């Protein structure tokens, strides 16, 4: 990793973020098209190229907590790289020692949730390299709203399946192995993940930002960690999913598990807030299928019963309630790759069973 300086135009070419050969996917803050900001897990920029033995990326990172790792896909080979400096442009060597005569596809993706964000300033290739046309993104579109499980937090803690999380500083988190992105790949669909570790539905609960911000105040935003008055709204006209998966309702048990008695006033109030949030998603996406779910991560079944009651009251033929075979009975920590793969298989089969017209 090197600090950015003006590159040698006789040796390298800068592929700027506005280059029409680059392909983007995800909820990305591109108000400044010369420095789009990546915040959401699984969001990516992709480039096909020939004639270069390496690819570098120039980014400016901003860390909120944990260490900061970026995901890399070279064709079908995955790796990661750490960004150690904050607040200044740095050059990251993503891949090297390539055959210059072959065409390759490189994807720089957000491995982690809003624990950090980075502005993308472009790719660097050897002088004379050519940017090729990327294959089109899939026509099918899915959007997920969720917490750590949807973001892929600590998914690579493979030895801790069925156990609490080991100590880590973000190096084990990988959205590529979240059940959500795996399911989207299996369905051959593009995906937006609006997901954050520790987030609850209701403001004032959960672990994210010490419980100050829940999904109900974040789901319309592009970036979660800006000051409230500065957080930008997402333009929902830019991406219209065929399927929306709402996987929220586990971190609301902190600091009090109000679903131990599902008949309490607090439990009924949460159910009403949940129903109002789903109705707001329906307003945004009048024609989408909406899947109500939680995950296999260990939690009290009262949360799923409450969602089930909200589902019955919504009485919408294109809103469905889905429970995994091991719903709420899995790892007490975050979802591991093994569990995520099983979840993705179950969820994708459930969506496929809705019929071919789900993608119309």
Image (cartoon, grey):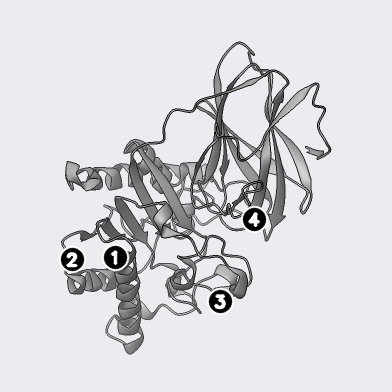
Between discs 1 and 4, the one toward the N terminus: 4
In this orientation, which residue lies closer to the viewer: 230 or 226? 230
Residue furthest top as drawn: 101
Q: Nearer the viewer, mark 2 or mark 3?
A: 2
Tell me which residue sits at (60%, 35%) in the image: 19
Q: Nearer the viewer, mark 4 or mark 2?
A: 2
Secondary structure type for disc 3: loop
Q: CA distance from mark 1 to mark 4?
A: 30 Å
Q: Which residue is mark 4?
A: 116
Classify 10 Å Cα crowding around label 4: few (below 14), some (14-19), many (20 and above).
many
Question: CA separation, marks 1 and 2?
Answer: 10 Å
- Compared with 329, 160 (above or below) is above
Q: Disc 1 or disc 3, which is closer to the eye?
A: 1
Q: Nearer the viewer, residue 104 or 16?
A: 16
Separation (CA) of disc 4 from disc 2: 37 Å
**CB within 8 Å, label 1 to label 2:** yes
Name the quadrant of the C terminus. top left
In this figure, which residue is indicated by the disc labeled 1?
Answer: 282
Marks 4 and 3, how far apart at CA: 18 Å
Determine contact: label 4, label 3, CB under 8 Å: no
Q: Which mark is on residue 212?
A: 3
Q: Position of residue 213 (x, y in %)?
A: 53, 73
Q: CA distance from mark 1 to mark 3?
A: 25 Å
Q: Earlier in the sequence, mark 1 or mark 3?
A: 3
Q: In the rendered structure, which disc, 4 or 2, sits on the residue that comes first in sequence?
A: 4
The residue that label 2 is drawn on is: 316
Say which of marks 1 and 4 sits in front.
1
Secondary structure found at label 4: strand
Assess disc 3: are there few (<14), some (14-19) or many (≥20) residues with their C-alpha within 10 Å of its C-alpha.
some
Q: Secondary structure at mark 2?
A: loop
The percent coordinates of residue 317 (x first, y second) are 15, 61
Label 2 vs label 3: CA separation?
Answer: 31 Å
């Amino acid at each position: 990793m090197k600090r950015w300086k003006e590159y040698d135009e006789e040796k390298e070419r800068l592929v700027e973020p506005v280059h029409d050969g680059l392909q983007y996917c995800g909820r990305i803050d591109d108000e400044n098209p010369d420095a789009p900001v990546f915040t959401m897990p699984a969001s990516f920029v992709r480039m096909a190229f020939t004639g270069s033995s390496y690819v570098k990326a120039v980014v400016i990172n901003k860390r909120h907590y944990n260490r900061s790792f970026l995901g890399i896909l070279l064709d079908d080979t995955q790796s990661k790289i750490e960004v150690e400096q904050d607040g200044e442009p740095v050059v990251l060597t993503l891949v090297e020692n390539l055959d210059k005569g072959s065409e390759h596809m490189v994807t720089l993706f957000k491995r982690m949730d809003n624990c950090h964000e980075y502005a993308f300033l472009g790719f660097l290739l050897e002088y004379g390299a050519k940017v090729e046309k990327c294959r089109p993104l899939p026509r099918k579109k899915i959007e997920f709203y969720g917490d750590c499980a949807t973001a892929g937090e600590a998914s690579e803690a493979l030895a801790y399946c069925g156990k609490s999380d080991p100590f880590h500083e973000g190096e084990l988190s990988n959205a590529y192995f979240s059940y959500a992105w795996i399911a989207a790949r299996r369905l051959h669909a593009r995906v937006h993940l609006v997901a954050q570790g520790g987030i609850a539905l209701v403001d004032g609960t959960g672990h994210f930002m010490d419980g100050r911000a829940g999904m109900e105040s974040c789901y319309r935003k592009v970036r979660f960690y800006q000051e409230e008055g500065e957080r930008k709204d997402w333009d929902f006209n830019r991406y219209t999913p065929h399927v929306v998966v709402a996987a929220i309702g586990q971190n609301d048990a902190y600091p009090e598990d109000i679903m131990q008695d599902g008949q309490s006033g607090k439990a009924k109030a949460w159910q009403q807030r949940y129903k109002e949030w789903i109705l707001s998603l329906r307003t945004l996406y009048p024609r989408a299928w909406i899947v109500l779910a939680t995950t296999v991560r260990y939690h009290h079944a009262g949360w799923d019963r409450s969602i089930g009651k909200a589902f019955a009251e919504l009485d919408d033929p294109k809103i469905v309630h889905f429970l995994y075979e091991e719903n709420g009975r899995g790892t007490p920590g975050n979802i591991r790759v093994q569990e995520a793969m099983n979840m993705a298989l179950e969820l994708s089969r459930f969506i496929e069973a809705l019929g071919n017209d789900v993608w119309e």
